Image (cartoon, grey):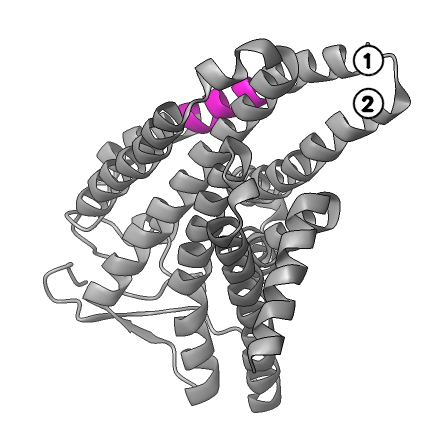
């Protein structure tokens, strides 16, 4: 038996057993992380440098790209380090930091996706009041509220999780530090307080999901009444990338945490955790840039300008 005061490090789940597979996973994670850094970095640079992209939709997209960068930089570097050096350890403070930033970026992303849905709803259903409802000050307040509330939320979760006594060793069944895995190490009944916070989290996710679904029902009802095919295509082109990102993020994360115990296996759990923690930050820039002509043009201009300078 051990307790949290005596634990100096945790043991993470190894991505592979053989050295060849470890190096393969290192290369795959390196490629995904470089794609995420490049894609999100280009979006941030394009939105910041192009004055015609200084609109609410692209302002929130810039914030989403920042949260995606934080999301992938929280888990992937340590996983790459462990695969390259054939180790499984992470320090106690490193694990706490990983939990904090993972929850912080994940909750911020959920809030931003909900706000971006509201932006699309106002743009299509309340277009005459768009400038009033989503002025620069309102957008700044919403973005700041998303980041600040996610910060407080993650701070509360992390402090509560790491105040629990741990009595079941230090081996985690995940390749990064995750709250449910740490709760499995806690003493009997001592985790009930954190389970209450997780129940609140589930209500929060469900509330955001209901708002997104309600908004898209309204949006599609309005779009389908647009007489011109070009108008419908333009409206759908601004909504479909967001809908794809929301679907990818929510479906993988919810299924990973709510799947039946009978379906649980180490390989499936590992695959699902990669799907919701690593893949979305890399795919989000691609989804948005492929469907949005303005963003695509700005990114190409930015890249062409950089090439000409060199």
Count numbered badges in the picture: 2
Which of these two is toward me, 294 or 256?
294
The x, y position of residue 183, in whole percent, is 31, 48
Secondary structure under tag 1 reads loop
Residue denoted by label 2: 232
Residue 168 visible in the displayed image? no
Q: Is residue 208 magenta?
A: yes
Q: Are marks 2 and 1 in contact (CB under 8 Å)?
A: yes
Report the residue at 11% width, 66% height from top: 6
Check the image and report above or below for 197 versus 118.
below
Q: In which quarter of the image is the C terminus?
A: bottom right
Residue denoted by label 1: 226
User: Which residues, given as a range, are shown in magenta?
Assistant: 203-212
Label 1 neighbour load within 10 Å: few <14, some 14-19, many 20+: few
The x, y position of residue 29, in whole percent, is 55, 73
Report the residue at 86% width, 26% height from top: 230
| Residue 12 appears left or right of 62 | left
Label 2 neighbour load within 10 Å: few <14, some 14-19, many 20+: some
Separation (CA) of disc 2 from disc 1: 6 Å
Q: Residue 86 carries which label?
A: none
Report the residue at 51% width, 45% height from top: 51
Q: Earlier in the sequence, mark 2 or mark 1?
A: 1
The x, y position of residue 169, in whole percent, is 27, 64
Check the image and report above or below for 148 versus 222.
below
Secondary structure under tag 2 reads helix
Report the residue at 81% width, 22% height from top: 231
């Amino acid at each position: 038996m051990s307790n949290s005061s005596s634990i100096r490090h945790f043991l993470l789940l190894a991505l592979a057993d053989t050295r060849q597979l470890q190096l393969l996973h290192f290369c795959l994670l390196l490629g995904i992380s470089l794609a995420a850094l490049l894609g999100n970095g280009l979006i941030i640079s394009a939105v910041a440098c192009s004055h015609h992209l200084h609109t609410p939709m692209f302002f929130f997209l810039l914030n989403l790209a920042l949260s995606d960068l934080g999301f992938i930089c929280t888990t992937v570097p340590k996983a790459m380090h462990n695969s390259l050096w054939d180790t499984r350890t992470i320090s106690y403070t490193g694990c706490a930091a990983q939990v904090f930033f993972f929850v912080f970026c994940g909750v911020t992303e959920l809030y931003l996706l909900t706000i971006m849905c509201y932006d699309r709803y106002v743009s299509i259903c309340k277009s005459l009041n768009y400038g009033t409802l989503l002025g620069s000050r309102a957008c700044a307040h919403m973005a700041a509220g998303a980041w600040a509330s996610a910060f407080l939320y993650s701070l509360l979760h992390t402090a509560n999780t790491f105040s629990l006594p741990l009595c079941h060793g230090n081996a985690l069944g995940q390749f990064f530090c995750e709250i449910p895995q740490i709760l499995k190490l806690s003493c009997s009944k001592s985790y009930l307080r954190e389970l209450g916070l997780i129940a609140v989290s589930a209500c929060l996710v469900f509330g955001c999901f209901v708002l997104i679904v309600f908004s898209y029902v309204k949006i599609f009802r309005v779009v389908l009444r647009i007489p011109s095919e070009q108008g419908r295509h333009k409206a759908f082109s601004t909504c479909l990338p967001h809908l794809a990102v929301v679907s990818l993020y929510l479906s993988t994360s919810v299924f990973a945490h709510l799947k039946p115990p009978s379906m649980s296996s180490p390989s499936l759990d590992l695959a699902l955790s990669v799907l919701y923690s690593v893949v979305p930050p890399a795919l989000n820039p691609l989804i948005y840039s492929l469907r949005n002509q303005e963003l695509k043009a700005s990114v190409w201009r930015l890249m062409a300008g950089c090439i000409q300078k060199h």
